[in-house]
Amino acid sequence: MGGGGYAIGTPRLLPPIPDRMARRIGHWVARQRLALSKAILHEVPGVRGAVAVALLTGDRGAVPEKVWSNLRDSGLAHLLAISGLHVGLMAGLLFTVARAALALFYWLARRFPAKKWAAVISLIGAFGYLQVTGSTIPTQRAFLMIGMGLTAVILDRVPFSMTVVAWAALVILLITPESLVTAGFQMSFAAVVALISTYEAMGPRLGQLRSRGGWGRRVCLYCGGVLLTTLIAGTATSPFAAFHFNRVATYGLAANLFAVPVMALWIMPWGLATYFLLPFGWQNLGLVPMAAGIGFVLDVAERVASWPGAVRLIPTMSNAVLILVTLGGLCLCIWTTRLHLLGVGAVAMGLLIGSVADPPDILINERGNLHAVRMNADEIVVSSDRPGFVRDSWLRRYGVSISRSWKALLLDTNAPLRCDSLSCQISLKGRRIAISKDPRAHEDDCNSADILLNTVPVRIDCTSPDVVIDRFGLWREGTHASYLKMGGVRVDTVQQYRGGRPWSP
């Protein structure tokens, strides 16, 4: 609805950061990242090179907006955001290569646990990937989760279990408790919990299939596992993506089924090879095949994004709906008895309630200079047709991409809106709403309107309308959202959600 903040303490000038070893190392890593980005773009110019830079250094600034739009609309934007997928792939590739290399030396494999040494090498490599890709918060979270799994391997524990996931979540929340309400935390753990639950249930059967066949069956099982992983992760994260971003890529599952295996089996392995080839000046040997895979993924994104109805915008779900879906998913994944089937009902109920979400009928911002009225499920009328952060956020939360302005609505002779120099009147759901911008209109509007919205203070006795919102109320309580119900009008304000916290005005 709206947000803001301010400092409650007295500013003070901090001393310069001392030139310590950690700072010098950070500067050196930044220079290496820049040099790596230049080397990649020199070998692979254009869009493919920009995407390769994003995957290998975390710098996404060179990726064109059109490419981002295609990736978002096709459900593939997560492939460019360095997160658990990329760190996990790098760590897994390093672990596999290191263990295979150690196994080549018979005397070494007999005397030392190759699996544990491979886990150590993989952990070091994952930390290096964390540094070279910018060490963002999502990447740090992914490294912590994967690091705990590799530590479990070193300690002869099961690396992929609900216990490890629970400890990883606990550690992350102790360090950054605010991450609990972020999309990255919720989607990451939703995918991990769903994957572990599925493969724990299917593990014995998959083990039998793997042991009975040769290399051909093992390759097919691996490729099938990548597809199954994509399906499970996409299904588990879709409710959280819908809640936070108000958009669902209709064909995202199909796009991921084609793109993720290429990312896992082709692009990232060649990206890892590029790191090792770079010191010798042979990076072209890794970048050229990597760019070919990137081109395939971009083609998939462009094609899927062009399909009719590729993006479906949905209104914001309530927190209760997300909590219900989350609890249902946890019951389904964690419980091992027949009671876990109750989770299916909880998830289905949550999704059903979320599908009939009831957005506010009227919004007015804290300054009173921006209003939005929901005429019907598909049409929003906004007082300004100029793009802006608040306006665009409202449209996204309503689940629409375009709106009509007051001026456009006034040109429609059949529209229930009339304006003069003092105020505007609009009929909605059997109620008359008046929006006054001049005190001279207050007396008439007070006598005729059911809901009175004012961009200026109301200084007369105005008791006839069911709801009166004026400039003082907006200043004190922030943005107002009004819901027109059969039994009356419900008004929510920013102040109600903000509460009386120390940082509240």
Image (cartoon, rainbow, N blue to C red):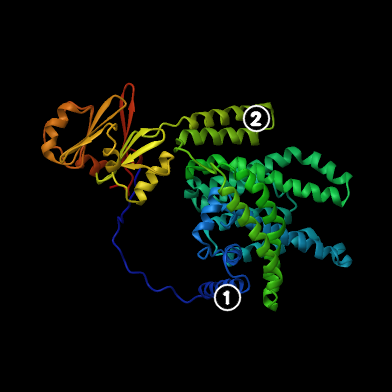
Identify which residue, 439 or 312, lies in the foreground: 312
Name the image quarter holding residue 397.
top left
Q: Is residue 147 visible?
A: no
Residue sitting at x 60%, y 36%? 330
Across and down, in percent, residue 141 comes to 57, 54
Across and down, in percent, residue 83 comes to 59, 55
SS assignment at label 2 = helix
Q: Residue flagged by tag 2: what amino acid is it?
A: His
Return the residue at label 1.
35
| C-alpha separation, residue under disc 2 versus residue under disc 1 | 52 Å
Q: Residues within 10 Å of mark 2 (few under 14, many from 20)?
A: some
Residue sitting at x 60%, y 67%? 49
Q: Earlier in the sequence, mark 2 or mark 1?
A: 1
Return the residue at label 2.
340
Q: Is residue 351 visible?
A: yes
Q: Residue flagged by tag 1: what amino acid is it?
A: Ala
